[in-house]
Image (cartoon, rainbow, N blue to C red):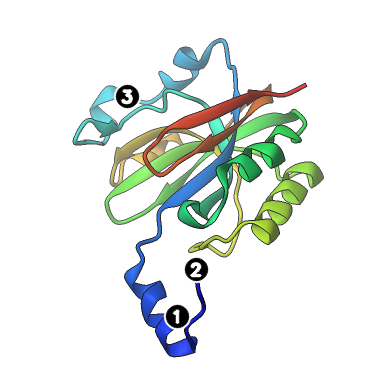
Amino acid sequence: MKFTGFKNWLFERKEQSLSYGCIMMGADIPDWNKKISIINKKDIYEKDGDFGYEKEPHITILYGIHDNEVDRDRIYEEIERIYPIEATITQISIFENPEYDVVKFDIPLDEDLADYRKYFLMIFPNTQNFPEYRPHITIAYCIKGTGRKYVQNIEPFTVTFNTSIYSSPNDEKKIFELT
């Protein structure tokens, strides 16, 4: 893009619509369907065939990457360098928002995960709307007001995040096995 002055750049920037990509880590959890079955079907929030139960357990490292400003091959090179992370999960909590509740497994923020996030924040243009990073695995989206009853400490279990994933704005995913 040619720089044509601050004012022009500012207006051009506003006119461009940003499309956000996401760097995630996936986990193969053999008893996933059993784990998410704690959520009663009558509490599930669905809209236009979306939301509901989480089908692919993952943690988000960085959402909000300006996909149209970054070379995808560069993203792929960087996320291929991630190493697997192991986490012990001990509790279920929720995020509440005006439309629904997100029931989730909390993931402890270890040093490696924090470093990955900081690194990607620095090297890729991005937009962040939440000041605090709270890694989690979504279990399900619930009807507003029903999620709180699932908040609890649970029997600890360990998960290994063994794939890195880039999800583009059109929900295409590029997955890398980590070693």
The residue beneath circle 2 is: 1
Residue type of the residue flagged with mark 1: Trp
- Residue drawn where x is 65% and y is 32% of the image: 90
Q: For marks 3 and 1, give the one nearer the viewer.
A: 1
The location of residue 179, given as percent across then percent down, is 78, 21
Numbered circle sitting on residue 19: none
Q: Secondary structure at mark 2?
A: loop
Picture layout, residue 76 above or below residue 56: below
Residue nearest the observer in this picture, 55 or 142: 55
The type of residue carrying mark 2 is: Met
Along the horizontal axis of the image, is 97 left or right of 117? Answer: left
Of the pair 169 and 56, the residue shown nearer to us: 169
How far is mark 3 from mark 1, CA to CA?
50 Å
Select label 2 or label 1 by which is in front: 2
Comparing 84 with 54, the one in front is 84
Q: Position of residue 108 (x, y in %)?
A: 70, 41
- The residue under the point 32% across, 37% down is 142
Asked if the residue under mark 2 is in contact with the one under mark 3, i.e. CB atoms within 8 Å, the reply is no
Q: Which residue is mark 3?
A: 40
The amino acid at mark 3 is Asn
Tag on residue 9? 1
Q: Who comes first in sequence, dot 3 or dot 1?
A: 1
Mark sitting earlier along the chain (2/1): 2
The answer to whether residue 148 shows anywhere in this view is no
